[in-house]
Amino acid sequence: MRIGVLTSSRADYGIYLPLLQKMKNDSFFEMEIIAFGTHLSKGHGYTLSDIQKDGYNCIHKIASLISNDDEQSIASSYGLTVLKFADFWENHKYDLILCLGDRFEMSSAVQAGIPFGVKFAHIHGGETTLGAIDNIYRHQISLASLLHFTATDVFSEKIKSLIGSSEGIITVGALSLNDIKKFIPLEKTTFFYKFAIPNEEFALVTFHPETISLQDNVRYAQEMKNAMTVISEKLFLVITMPNADTQGSIYREAIQELKNDLPNRILLIENFGKINYFSAMYYAKILIGNTSSGILEAASFGKYVINVGDRQKGRVQSGNVLNCEFEESAIILATNEAIKLNKYDGENVYFKSDAVNNIIKILKEFL
């Protein structure tokens, strides 16, 4: 089976990884990686190098991002990605293409494949994020796909309502949690030394723009900066940088100012990689921000999450999530509450056992 895998960012590649590792060693699959988006951006860590280290037989590279992140540049990047993939789909044929998530780059690659009759299998469809325009992109991808591997039954029902059918919809759980019970973090002293983290409690922080509320992001970035300044007095801050979203540079600039103001209390990370990121989650006291990993994965590490604003609004949540407004005092108050809590010992609603094997079984049956 000749199968292509669309990956446009460090985030989706990390989620794919357990599936790709299994498929790479299965002679049934002739797998080719199609890397584009921020993987080829030096400003976002040039994560193509991480893919190359994993030893795939074939990696296609498609550069289509414009460096700016205003609305016109994002739209232009979308159009350029469609043009690049029009050529790619014309010259490359597959039995099936895997796509994942909700990035605008992923949506444009999929939309370009529709006239060519490309068969897509979508992972993590059916989810709802009312504070992000990605909500639209995700549903576009679902509408163009034949197979749907969802994280919960709620999301399976959402796709059913979108496409008007239950055919090809399978609830497998969150793919990134496939090996979570077997995960062994880097040894603590090694991890702290590797990233120059002081021997104290830290918060793992990730903020992205609210792409539905473009007029508010300048204010939100300042609220974030003010709150993090206060919180840094209690916790060291390990901050992972935003993806290539509309107005992401506003947050990058605020985070860099924060680092300049508090150089000894802030660590900035462009690209952790999955093992390092999961190790950071394992050792963190709490998570703060508005990233999907706080919703999907943190519960499996027993961590409480301060989920800020509306970016993740609409996603199913486990009992470890504390929601607050995108406002300085609200973020500080929620953080102070979370610090007092012990380890979260409830369930993760996104976990189902054997996600990878279930997906592979369905893929083989599909053909």
Image: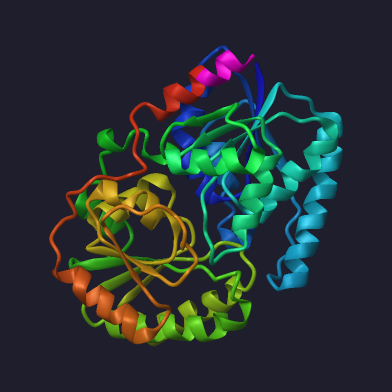
| Residue 248 located left or right of residue 195 | right
Q: Tell me what residue is drawn at x 44 percent, y 32 percent.
A: 172
| Residue 258 located left or right of residue 45 | left
- In x, y percent, where is residue 56? 58, 29
Q: Tell me what residue is drawn at x 45 percent, y 43 percent.
A: 154
Specify the quadrant of the image occupied by residue 29: top right
| Residue 6 located left or right of residue 51 | right
| Residue 10 located left or right of residue 201 | right
Vertical side of 66 occupied by 85: above or below: above
Vertical side of 139 occupied by 236: above or below: below
Quarter in which the N terminus is drawn: top right
Along the line of sight, the residue nearer the viewer: 267 or 75: 75
Can I make out residue 264 in this image?
A: no
What main secondary structure does the magenta stretch of the protein show? helix
User: Can residue 180 be found in the magenta stretch?
Assistant: no
Q: Tell me what residue is drawn at x 61 percent, y 65 percent.
A: 245
Which segment is the magenta one?
A: 362-367
